[in-house]
Image (spheres, rainbow, N blue to C red):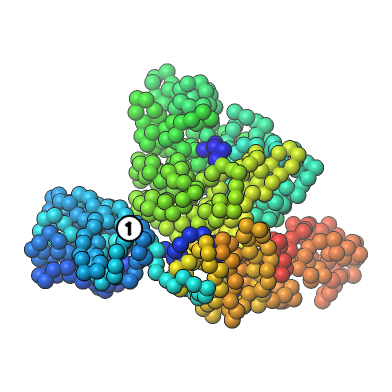
Amino acid sequence: MKKNKKAISFGYPTCVFLILILTLGTSYGDVANILVNPGFETGTTTGWTARGGNVRISAGSSSPSPHTGTYRGQAVSRSATWMGIQQNVLGKMVIGQTYQVSGWVRTASPSTTVNLTFEKTDSGVTSWSQGASGTANNSGWTYISGSYTLTANGTLTALNFYVESLDLNDVYLDDANVYGAVPGVAGPNATGQVNFTVTHQTLDGFGAAGAWYQNNVTTYGSSNPNIYNILFRDLGIDIYRIRNTYSIDSSYITQTAQLISAGEAALGHPLRIMNTSWSPPASLKSNGSTVGGTLAKDGNGNYRYADFAQWWADSLTAWSNAGVDSYYVNMQNEPGYIDTWDTCKLDPTENSTNAGYEQAFAALCTKLNSLPSRPILLAPEGQDTASTPSYVNALTAADKSNVYGYSHHLYDGSADAPDGLISKMATLKAAIGGDGKPLLQTEFSKGGPFVWTDAMNLAILMHNALTVEEASAYLYWELFWVSPSGLVSVSTTGYTINPVYYAMKHFSKFTDPGWQRVDANSTSSDLRISAYKDPCEPNAAIIVINTSTTNDVNLTLSLNGFNPGNSGIYQSKSDANFAYIGTFSTSNKVLLPKQSITTIHLAGFADCAAVQASGNHRLDSDLNGDCYVDYEDLAIIAYYWLHTDCTAPGNCQGADFAPMDGTVNFLDFADFGPQWMQCNNPLDANCTPNW
């Protein structure tokens, strides 16, 4: 939506790469599903009890089959509507906080109302409140969701969560969720730990878009190339989202190709390019314009899906010829949204008014699948969490077999209230997250000017997307924009790094595609925590968000046996930007100032010598062993140039690369060149290592 709005690896336990990101902001910390055994997957009723003296409950696997997994809960012999399955949640919820309540329900009757209800006893007075309600039946599972705010006038002596139905037939429950703040002790000291054995989603990475104002970057960058270090190297992004303007704006393709080339050179490795269409050319539009309208129809009154697919195939060739290979393709940006910029309305399936997303996507798959290779296809990149499921559900099984993951934006929420999207994220995950495909958040932002609170809100929103929705990617809208918006505001004569840049950097700088989220927790109600690891070699990243506006927190972090040899702590707050503040030790507390974001970077290699000695992690072109491939190494090549006596074991200080024929010549330089200006020094946070 156009609005003003690294492959790192170490050996374990020899080497660990860890990030700790801490954000401080409002009043409570860890958020999680507070229910025990929410899907009955222990195969027992652990955590659950029968509600009512005659009720029998079970965790069954027989008919009806569970919604997910192997088991589901069942209550039988109900003689009153309030009888069912319940769980004691006293002491597990925070007074004053709102919890997102959901579950998959089913009954033995053709149709009845099913409620997820809370029973509370407050100073001796018992009351009941519905957290979620809906109509269920005996032919399939029904998802119901809502919210519940825990209040108390005095002392709570009982608090139960239960499922009930308005008839007396059997009632079933699976995948129940009471998601919200976990109680803890707010104060100056906290402990945290990570469980690396329990894994969740795999990361595609972090990134941002460069869909407009690329001319500002290329113009300024022509005489000030450091702008590419700021946008790419220093930020460490993985995904760069572009606008497909083939047959619309050729200058955008040329400038974007130049920008990507410079960005990848600064970054030291390729970007994952996400190519998105805002609109096909005017010749393919119903209104003859790239602004508004839908796909045009042919002379027989049929929408021109095949022509649209051909345009996409031709555009990928054009981009590739310009030097840009698309890693992901989003066929249409926000297909359900029309505004005063380039858009194209596609309804989930075709009708007399608008072309159908499903039909267009099927045509795209037919065309691209005929090519020797094609990019990864994403769908549907809806403008918000509410509209996205209708587009996903319109896709056929054949369509979905071509979809890698489901992409969406977050424009049904406010950047100033990140927790307001928790319920919507949970609902989206329940609606489309059940088939194992990753969910990717590919656009969201607010326009500037920015203050530090905006950076805090972005960090919290990213945490929520990663832990509630379990998004595999998070993309900011504007990597660069005109002042005062964007992660960086760029003109043809200068730039400004905005506070939100540092919130993104704390997540993106030290993580990479392919990492997995793992379980993490803390003892403080001021802290939220998430953690990530490299599944190939156990590097890790721990992200903690402290929501206090008043308390500095001293955190003691347990690494569960990790023994890093090197570390660095980087901290941002209203008066400091990603500042290095020292090293980390599990025996020492980390001081987390209020309203700050802190990244702890841990590396198992203590120094460059250990990297060089590690074999698989060394850079062969680093001839002098200082963990940098630079002019000093080139000087060694030059010194031995055309020597014919470079035999083992020295090979002229390693200048005679494979095939190690005893001569230093262009064959050796061809091996040396690809690692030029790379480094793998664990003491240097700006290195682009080869591990």
Viewer can see residue 498: yes
Looking at the image, is 371 positioned above or below residue 425?
Answer: above
Looking at the image, is 52 positioned above or below residue 372?
Answer: below
Question: Quarter-wise, where is residue 22 in the image?
Answer: bottom right
Query: Which residue in the structure is indicated by mark 1?
Result: 149
Question: Quarter-wise, where is residue 65 in the image?
Answer: bottom left
Q: Position of residue 134 (x, y in %)?
A: 22, 50
User: How many discs mark residues in the rendered view?
Assistant: 1
* Identity, as a three-letter code, of the amino acid under mark 1: Thr
Question: Which quarter of the image is occupied by the C terminus?
Answer: bottom right
Q: Is residue 312 left or right of residue 483?
A: left
Q: Residue at x 35, y 53 (%)?
A: 430
Q: Position of residue 399 (x, y in %)?
A: 40, 43
Q: Position of residue 652 (x, y in %)?
A: 86, 70
Badge 1 crowding class, 10 Å Cα cut-off, few under 14, some 14 to 19, many 20 or more, is some
Q: Residue at x 28, y 69 (%)?
A: 156
Question: Quarter-wise, where is residue 18 in the image?
Answer: bottom right
Q: Position of residue 108 (x, y in %)?
A: 14, 56
Q: Residue at x 67, y 49 (%)?
A: 497
Q: Is residue 105 left or right of residue 197?
A: left
Looking at the image, is 308 positioned above or below residue 181?
Answer: above
Q: Is residue 558 left or right of residue 260?
A: left
Check the image and name the residue furthest to the left: 79
Disc 1 secondary structure class:
strand
Nearer to me, 208 or 398: 208
Q: Residue at x 46, y 22 (%)?
A: 286
Nearer to me, 678 or 400: 678
